[in-house]
Amino acid sequence: MHTAHPSLDLRGIPCPLSFVKAKLFLEKLPSGSQVALWLDGGEPTEQVPHSLSAEGHHILDLAVQDDHYVLTVQKA
């Protein structure tokens, strides 16, 4: 499941800081890496996937897990 990928917990971090942290996290990984980003609902789940997609990354999944969301992204 999501635990197989590197993950970053962005719960409690508002936009646009959550996007900036996700972008910096992805920069450290090789191209093609898949990561799981834990997000709060609302603005983070709307803005982070859109912004990462605009940067060229591939959004693979956005799933509800308990009281948060898990966004699975493949680095461009």
Image (spheres, rainbow, N blue to C red):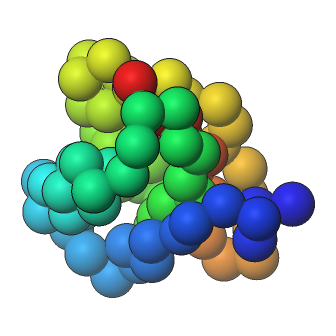
Farthest residue toward the bottom?
A: 12
Residue 25 horizontal side relative to residue 67, left or right: left
* Number of marks drawn: 0
Q: In the picture provided, is 14 more to the left or to the right than 67? A: left
Residue 9 image position (x, y, % from top left): 45, 77
* x and y percentages locating residue 20 in the rendered image: 14, 55
Residue visible at 75% across and 71% down?
A: 3
Q: Is residue 42 toward the left or the right of residue 68 in the image?
A: left
Residue 52 visible in the displayed image: yes
Q: Residue furthest front?
A: 30
Residue 15 shows in the view = no
The answer to which image quadrant residue 10 occupies is: bottom left
Please tell me which residue is depicted at 56% across the width and 66% down the height of the picture: 6
Q: Is residue 62 above or below residue 8?
A: above
Residue at x 24%, y 48% (from the top left corner): 27
Name the residue located 53 percent from the left edge and 43 percent from the top edge: 33
Q: Which image quarter is the C terminus in?
A: top left
Where in the figure is residue 11, as x and y percent of width and height?
41, 77
Q: Position of residue 53 (x, y in %)?
A: 36, 22
Image position of 40 (left or right of 36)? left
Front-lying residue, 16 or 54: 54
Q: Does residue 41 lie above or below 51 as drawn?
A: below
